[in-house]
Structure formats: C-alpha cells, structure tokens
Image: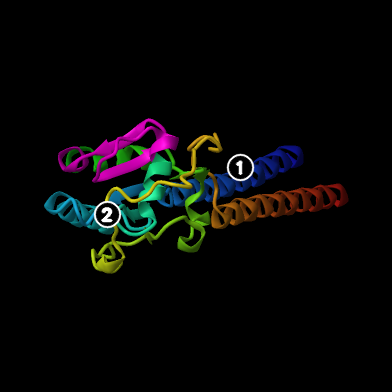
Amino acid sequence: MGINMKRLATLSIVLVTYTILAILISHAAAAQEGGTEVCLVYFTSYACGDDCSLTDTFMDGLMSEYTGNLTAIVYYTDVQGNANVFQAYRRTYNLPDSVPLVLFGSNNYLLDIDNIYQNTESKILDFIDANGTNCPLDSGYVPPWQVGAGSLPGQAMILTTGGQLKRDDIKKNNTVPADESKENISSGNETDKTENVFELNEPMKETVFSLVIIGIVLMVVAAIIIYVWDKTQESL
C-alpha cells in the first residue's frame, strides 16, 4: 500500500510540474505571436499628387489598425537626399522607378494606389501569421527594433503607431527635382543576404530565459518533495 501511495504521489507531482510548464510555455507562445512585427518601407512623394496623398492616409489607417505589429520606414522621394536612397533601394531590390510603392522584401513589393489598397493589408496579415519580418534596408535586412531614424540614410521617418504620417512633417522647401543628381548612389552589391525572417527580440528572449529558470526550479522542488517522501516512507 505504501509503495502504491509513493508511486501515486510521485506521478502526481510530475504531472503537476509538467502541467504548470505547459501553461507557462503556451502563454509565452501566445505573447510571442501577439508581438510579431511586420516591417515595410513606404516610398511616397509630394509631386505625385492625390495618389500619394490618398495612399499616405491609407497607410496611416493600417498603422492605427495594427499598432504593435507594424513598423513603417517612410521616404518622400522628392525630399533632398531621398532620391539617392530610392535609387539605392531600386538597385538592391530591382524596383520600378515609380511611387507610391510599399516594399516588404526581395521580390515582394506593391506599386500604385490600387495595388496598395487591395493587397497591403492581406500581406501584413500573412506576415503576422508567419511570425513577422525584418526591415528591408538598402544594405540588407535588420530586425525592426534595431532600426532608428538616425541610423538610416537620407531623411526617413519611422512610424510605429497610427496617425503619425503627415505630409508636412518634412518641409516642402527641402524637396528637390525628381531628376536629382544620382552621384554616389549605393550600388546595392553589398546587400546582406540574411533571410527576411523574424527573430526573437530582447523581451522575448528574457521571457524564454525566465521560463527555463522557472522550469528548472519546479523540477528541483519536485525532486526535493519526492526525496522527502521517500525518507518519510523509510522511517515508517
């Protein structure tokens, strides 16, 4: 009878431990899924008129809709310095010389207002389901949390929440003709070929590390309880 009780107690402890671990891991997985981040580059222009103005408003709406899951790097191509940046992107990702344009990565972009209206949201949802993307820069891919406006070429805006894309954020007197000199344009041959896949950010890494520690502690506690139970049974 004592042996059966011992086995039952041991089995119960092990089952409880693994149940707790499964709950913690499922919560972590849900948190990671909810925190997936899609990064895109949006090229627009003052000169392209209503198409770009309407697309700006549309992109604003997406930023509001997917706050926490979407980061956009925005370039007005007719702002001084940004024409060179756009040409560098074109060479790296083989893009057409036209805006509005939304770039997700290699061989993955949307051009013109109708295409952007019809397909941008579905692409964002697909990438969220696939655990997010890295940011396509003119020199390769980097995780979204490593992108800062000061580290980007030209005059870029980085949007992480809705309602921030304003056409007057960069003064129009900084604009230049569309045929701005293209000297010193990056060739794009130094592109980092890192795959455009999402990686764990620091908070996620901390969560996983915490789960591992909690799991080890729970197993140690279970082992101690089993050991004490054994000693108690021996003394009976």
Q: Secondary structure at mark 2?
A: loop
Give left or right: position of 26 versus 116: right
73 versus 110 height, above or below? below
Q: Which residue is mark 2?
A: 177
Asked if residue 5 can be seen in this view, the reply is yes
Tell me how far mark 1 sits from mark 2, CA to CA: 70 Å
What percent of the width, then of the height, locates residue 53? Answer: 17, 56
Q: Amino acid at mark 2?
A: Pro
User: Could you tell me the amino acid type at mark 1?
Assistant: Leu
Give neighbour class at mark 2: few <14, some 14-19, many 20+ (Cα, 10 Å): few
The quadrant in which the N terminus is found is top right
Residue lying at 42% horizontally and 36% vertically, measured from the top left:
91
Residue carrying label 1: 15
The answer to whether residue 108 is above or below residue 176 is above
- Residue extending farthest to the left is 50
Q: In which image quadrant can residue 123 be found? A: top left
Circle nearer the N terminus (1, 2): 1
- Seen as rendered, the residue at the extreme right is 235
Residue drawn 22% across the image and 38% down it? 119
Residue 58 location in percent, x, y? 19, 53
Magenta stretch: give its range: 90-116
